[in-house]
Image (tube, rainbow, N blue to C red):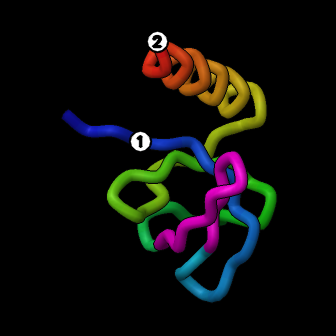
Amino acid sequence: MCLAVPMKIVEINGLEAVAELQGVRRKVRLDLVDGCRVGDYVLIHAGFVIEKLDEEQARKSLETWEEFLSLQDD
């Protein structure tokens, strides 16, 4: 099973970026998607940005993640 996580880009240095989700930051690669900028929401898989998301898509995806994670606490 593949899993892609929505994150927000907070820094860019060449083809490497830092993306953040709920205060957790990870280095990610931008090789696969052109035109990423600071502030963009993206899907991350295996350390690579695989898709840019608009704000609405990101919001829905993050809500789904939060719901899933809340079920893990039960």
- 1 or 2: mark nearer the eye: 2
Q: Is residue 72 visible?
A: yes
Query: Residue 31, percent across and down?
Result: 44, 73
The structure residue drawn at horizontal position 69% and vertical position 78%, both measured from the top left corner, is 12
* Location of mark 1 (residue): 4
Query: Residue 17, percent across and down?
Result: 60, 75
Locate the N terminus by quadrant. top left
Say which amino acid is labelled 1. Answer: Ala
**Total numbered labels placed on residues in the image:** 2
The structure residue drawn at horizontal position 64% and vertical position 29%, both measured from the top left corner, is 62
Q: Is residue 57 magenta?
A: no
Q: Which residue range is magenta in the image?
A: 18-30
Quarter where residue 6 is shown: top right
Q: Are marks 1 and 2 in contact (CB under 8 Å)?
A: no
Instruction: Give neighbour class at mark 2: few <14, some 14-19, many 20+ (Cα, 10 Å).
Output: few
Quarter where residue 9 is shown: bottom right
Residue 55 in the image: above or below residue 41: above
* Location of mark 2 (residue): 74
Most extreme residue toward the bottom is 14
Instruction: Give neighbour class at mark 1: few <14, some 14-19, many 20+ (Cα, 10 Å).
Output: some
The structure residue drawn at horizontal position 78% and vertical position 66%, both measured from the top left corner, is 38
As measured in the structure, the alpha-carbon distance from the residue carrying label 1 to the one carrying label 2 is 23 Å
Q: Is residue 24 magenta?
A: yes
For numbered disc 1, what is the local secondary structure?
Answer: loop
